Image (cartoon, helix red, strand yellow):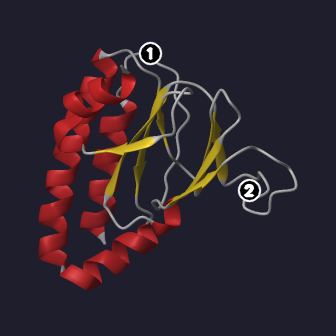
Amino acid sequence: MKKCILILCCFLIIVSCNKNKKKVVEKSNIVKSIVVSKFNSSNNLIPKVNSDTLIIKSKCAIIYDQTEKNIEKRKKEIGEEKFYVGADDFLFYLNEANEYLESKEIKIITTENHKILKFVSDNKKVTIINLDLEKDMGGVYLFNSKQTPKKINIMDISDEFESYMK
């Protein structure tokens, strides 16, 4: 338990060390995407907006990580030692991705208390991502309001960023 808290603290310190940039902080669980063709209040696929929903309408990068509940579940699935080795690697690459995104001067939003990401594009197309359904340790979504959001490979951040944001 102490190791888990230590890893989460390290992650939060790394993510929060942005140089005077405004951020919305969110800790989350992870992701499955539903694309809704046009925003329509009568559409049952669009959940009511509440405190666990983060609405994104402009160009940004969303960094998310798992909840304590999912961390404990994952430790049981793969074993505590393998979990911590993977968590260490993940935090290294996430830190590298965060530094790269900062160098590109893109708005970075980290998830905390939000389980649902609701991306609204310029043409009112809505993409909803439920972070509770994600199986990875965490990751990064890029969003450009002219496209649907994209979950990127943090180990290849520069190519993924350049390809999506062009």
Q: Position of residue 15 (x, y in %)?
A: 35, 36
Q: Is residue 153 above or below residue 129?
A: above
**Label 2 is placed on what type of residue?**
Ile
Q: Write the residue at 68% across / 30% down.
A: 123
Q: Is residue 49 left or right of residue 15?
A: right
- Residue at image location 50% in from the left, 27% down from the top: 144
Residue identifier under label 2: 46
Position of 30 with respect to 114 (left or right) is left
Q: In this orientation, does residue 140 appear? A: yes
Whether residue 114 is visible, yes or no, is no
Question: Given the current orientation, which residue lies at the most extreme bottom position?
Answer: 76
Q: Quadrant of residue 119?
A: top right
Local crowd at mark 2 within 10 Å, few (<14), some, or many (≥20)? some
* Contact, mark 2 vs mark 1 (Cβ under 8 Å): no
Which quadrant of the structure image shows residue 95? top left
87 or 165, which lies in front?
165
What kind of element bears circle 2?
loop
Looking at the rendering, in which quadrant would you find the N terminus? bottom left
